[in-house]
Image (cartoon, rainbow, N blue to C red):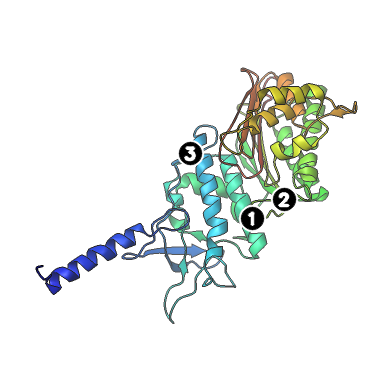
């Protein structure tokens, strides 16, 4: 056998090491960087800090919107939450003071982070997705007693930064203490910054802020008594039920919750539209609703519609949400109002226009005045329950 020269042997060894580096991946399938480190800037409310990212950035879909780009968006949300909440637990080298940062290996060196999401790639960020992002940052900040740093905020796209800024993301998660008025007035458009809480006092404050938005939309002689009463009743009941029942005792959560809900709203006076978005990271409707005293007619509907042998864990979630939307009397002859959601649906009918979309765990339910009910399920969870309620009050 011909002897391999030292130079050729060294070249083969280099090729082998390179191939092994390419094969090494992180828990979220992002390749670990070895030859070239990515220098980033971390901001946690003070002066930006230069650091090194160990992994390549996670690239989100350009359009992060559950309505226009559902499959890509919901899959990314699941992947992003895993990387943000679980990634920092996999390294014992992480700082106890800041659980997302690995201290420098030597004096004068730069700290390191395990990875980050490239917000510069986002061209569209919907209010609903911005709500989920805010809630996840808020949850982690509470559990770790430290705010996850914003990475390369100077490079964030205008679409991402503007939406998060308008909704009060930075104040909600504690990246800045400068809190301006909850109501942002932009001519004919007025938005309410995200309000979060877990008790009755905070619930009342959120309801009052939304009431101000509906007053902003009201014509000179106000809304009809029927619309005003239905609006206050359905919104109040939905919020109260979320606060009271989203986090049942004894439920085993995939991610530790903090028992909070988050809500925001926007009033567009030029179109006469009120949009309310409510989110919680609780057990979800497909989990809690089957544990209730379900009316026999609805139980028969669910039995007929659900898949006997599901292809994925959440395949019947859409059916359970649709069942929860059907008002009726329970088997004990008590009136069943679900989570206040049927009243939201009824108000759309009263107004003659609008829509109600419910994302709960892997299920999706959508109703609008112009089409039939649509419900389906997806393998990825929204991480709780998200309600997007759009009312067309222009004709009232």
Quadrant (top left/top right/bottom left/bottom right) for the C terminus: top right
Q: Classify 303 as above or below 29.
A: above
Q: Nearer the viewer, residue 41 or 178?
A: 41
- Badge nearest the viewer, 3 or 1: 3
Local crowd size for mark 2, using a 10 Å CA cut-off: few (<14), some (14–19), many (≥20):
many
Pointers 2 and 1 in contact (CB under 8 A)? yes
Which mark sits nearer the N-terminus, 3 or 1?
3
- Cα separation, mark 2 vs mark 3, equals 27 Å
* Residue at mark 3: 72
- Cα separation, mark 3 vs mark 1, equals 24 Å
Q: Classify 130 as above or below 294.
A: below
* Residue at mark 1: 138
Q: Residue furthest bottom?
A: 107
Question: Splitting the image into 4 quarters, where does residue 22 fall?
Answer: bottom left
Q: Element at badge 3?
A: helix
Q: Is residue 224 visible?
A: no
Which mark sits nearer the N-terminus, 2 or 3?
3
Q: Element at badge 2?
A: loop
Local crowd size for mark 1, using a 10 Å CA cut-off: few (<14), some (14–19), many (≥20):
many
Question: Splitting the image into 4 quarters, where does residue 334 fall?
Answer: top right
Q: Element at badge 1?
A: helix
Q: Residue furthest right?
A: 333
Q: Position of residue 125 (x, y in %)?
A: 51, 42
The residue shown at (59%, 40%) is 128
* Residue at mark 2: 260
Quadrant (top left/top right/bottom left/bottom right) for the N terminus: bottom left
Q: Position of residue 314 (x, y in %)?
A: 61, 37
- Badge nearest the viewer, 2 or 3: 3
């Amino acid at each position: 056998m011909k002897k391999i020269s030292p130079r050729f042997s060294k070249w083969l060894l280099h090729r082998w090491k390179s191939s092994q580096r390419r094969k090494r991946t992180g828990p979220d399938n992002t390749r670990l960087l070895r030859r070239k480190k990515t220098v980033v800037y971390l901001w946690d409310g003070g002066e930006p800090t230069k650091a090194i990212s160990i992994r390549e950035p996670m690239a989100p879909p350009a359009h992060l919107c559950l309505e226009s780009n559902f499959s890509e968006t919901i899959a990314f949300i699941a992947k992003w939450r895993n990387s943000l909440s679980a990634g920092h637990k996999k390294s014992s080298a992480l700082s106890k003071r800041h659980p997302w940062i690995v201290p420098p290996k030597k004096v004068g060196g730069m700290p390191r982070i395990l990875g980050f999401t490239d917000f510069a790639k986002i061209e569209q960020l919907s209010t609903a997705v911005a709500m989920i992002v805010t809630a996840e940052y808020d949850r982690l900040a509470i559990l770790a007693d430290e705010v996850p740093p914003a990475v390369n905020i100077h490079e964030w796209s205008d679409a991402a930064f503007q939406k998060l800024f308008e909704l009060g993301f930075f104040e909600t998660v504690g990246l800045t203490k400068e809190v301006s008025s909850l109501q942002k007035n932009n001519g004919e458009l007025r938005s309410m910054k995200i309000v979060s809480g877990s008790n009755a006092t905070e619930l009342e404050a959120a309801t009052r802020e939304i009431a101000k938005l509906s007053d902003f939309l009201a014509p000179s002689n106000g809304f009809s008594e029927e619309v005003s009463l239905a609006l206050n009743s359905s919104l109040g009941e939905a919020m109260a039920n979320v606060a009271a029942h989203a986090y049942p005792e004894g439920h085993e959560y995939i991610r530790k919750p903090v028992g909070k809900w988050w809500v925001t709203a926007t009033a567009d006076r030029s179109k006469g539209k009120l949009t309310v978005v409510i989110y919680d990271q609780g057990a979800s409707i497909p989990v809690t609703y089957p544990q209730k005293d379900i009316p026999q007619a609805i139980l028969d509907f669910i039995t007929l519609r659900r898949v006997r042998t599901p292809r994925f864990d959440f395949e019947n979630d859409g059916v359970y949400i649709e069942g929860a939307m059907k008002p009726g009397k329970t088997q004990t002859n008590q009136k069943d109002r679900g989570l206040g959601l049927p009243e939201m649906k009824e108000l759309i009918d009263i107004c003659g226009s609008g829509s109600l979309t419910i994302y709960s765990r892997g299920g999706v339910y959508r109703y609008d005045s112009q089409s039939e009910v649509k419900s389906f399920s997806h393998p990825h969870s929204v991480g709780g329950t998200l309600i997007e309620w759009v009312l067309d009050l222009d004709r009232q």
